[in-house]
Amino acid sequence: MLNRTSPRIVGWEQTQESKPWYTKSGRLEFYRDEEEFIEYGENLPVAREPVDGTPYEPNVIMARPHPAIRPAPPEAYGLTADDLRVEVRQVRNIVRTPEEIAASLHPRRRDGFTHVLITPKYRHACHTTGASTDLDVVFWGPFGDFYRHDPRKPWVGEGYIDLNPEDARELGIEDGDYVRCIADPEDRPFTGFDAGHQDGKVASWLVRARYYPSIARGVGRAWFHFHIATHGSVEGHETRPDRLAKNPRTGYQAGYRYGSHQSVTRAWLRPTLQTDSLVRKDTAGQMLGKGFEPDVYCVVGAPKESFVRIERAEPGGEDGERRWSPADKGFRPGYESEAVLKYLKGAFIRVEG
């Protein structure tokens, strides 16, 4: 668990106490001779584009020509190199140079998909920190309101997507607006998705947008802590007098009116994360093992990323028509009032001496 040092330092015992590394040889190994790694082109340290979290051609191996990197081509699996279907992306062993990748496009770019969406876990948090209690959620981000002046609000707070203000303006999105976040419809939120279907309404993600200048352009961020909408929470939102997105039978409280970050993400079955031959350390203790081990070499689900299209859905004002109040009053990035600009310059302070 790397508890010998604080902060945790990987390899401290190996570099400071000459203990062996957790490999077959006991040394750092930069070449994998297991057949799976050779077949998938990852026997040398290489970078892969994400399967669906990049604006470029997905899941390609970034490398210069090298005799040791000789992955099995798509044709070896009965596929073709230009097959970019969702399920096929996770097993494409295509080698591209950095220049070729930079000149490539994700197949959904032509459909108006513009943003890599990341769904990280907050560093100093458990899985549901920020979403477990009303006090948590009201202080998590800028949309908390104990009084729920806007009855569209699913709870006393709600989840949101952080967007670079310049990106948002180009998409016609104002700070605080509700947006639809859409992933590859081939399989998300489910295969055969139809927005008119009851399941489609529940699963289609409606979420607030927050201007966040430190987010890189082309990237959106949504914390993965918030509880997803369910059939019961949607029923509560649409039938309860207070419009809380709360299941009327179980009391389950959602952090979204419809859908969630789970609507646009999925787990990917990367071959080298399922190997039966790789020697690795056990999760706990000092033992070496081989193959599957939870959280070492196995399929994991979160955090996840995806390539998405973001569309303005509803104005952010409490009346459902006007601009969100903090932006309208000049308190938000990109909407700064004269007083806020004066405050940022420190002009309200006079130093005498």
Image (cartoon, helix red, strand yellow):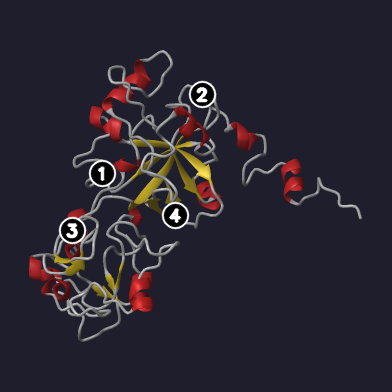
In this view, the residue in front, 175 or 83, is 175
Rendered view: 4 above or below 172: below
Residue 153 as seen in the image, left or right of residue 250: right
Q: Residue furthest top?
A: 241
For label 3, count other residues whose C-alpha is less than 10 Å away and answer few (under 14), some (14-19) or many (20+): some
Which residue carries the number 4 mark? Answer: 219
Q: Are marks 1 and 3 in contact (CB under 8 Å)?
A: no
Give, as a three-letter code, the residue at label 4. Answer: Val
Q: How far is disc 1 from disc 3 in space, using C-alphas?
A: 28 Å
For label 1, count other residues whose C-alpha is less than 10 Å away and answer few (under 14), some (14-19) or many (20+): some
- Name the mark on residue 293: 3
Nearer the N terminus, badge 2 or badge 1?
2
Q: How far is disc 4 from disc 1 in space, using C-alphas?
A: 19 Å
Give, as a three-letter code, the residue at label 2. Answer: Asp
Nearer the N terminus, badge 2 or badge 4?
2
Q: Residue furthest right?
A: 353
Residue 140 as seen in the image, left or right of residue 199: right
Give, as a three-letter code, the residue at label 1. Answer: Arg
Which residue carries the number 2 mark? Answer: 150
User: Which residue is located at x 41 percent, y 13 percent?
Assistant: 241
Which residue carries the number 1 mark? Answer: 188
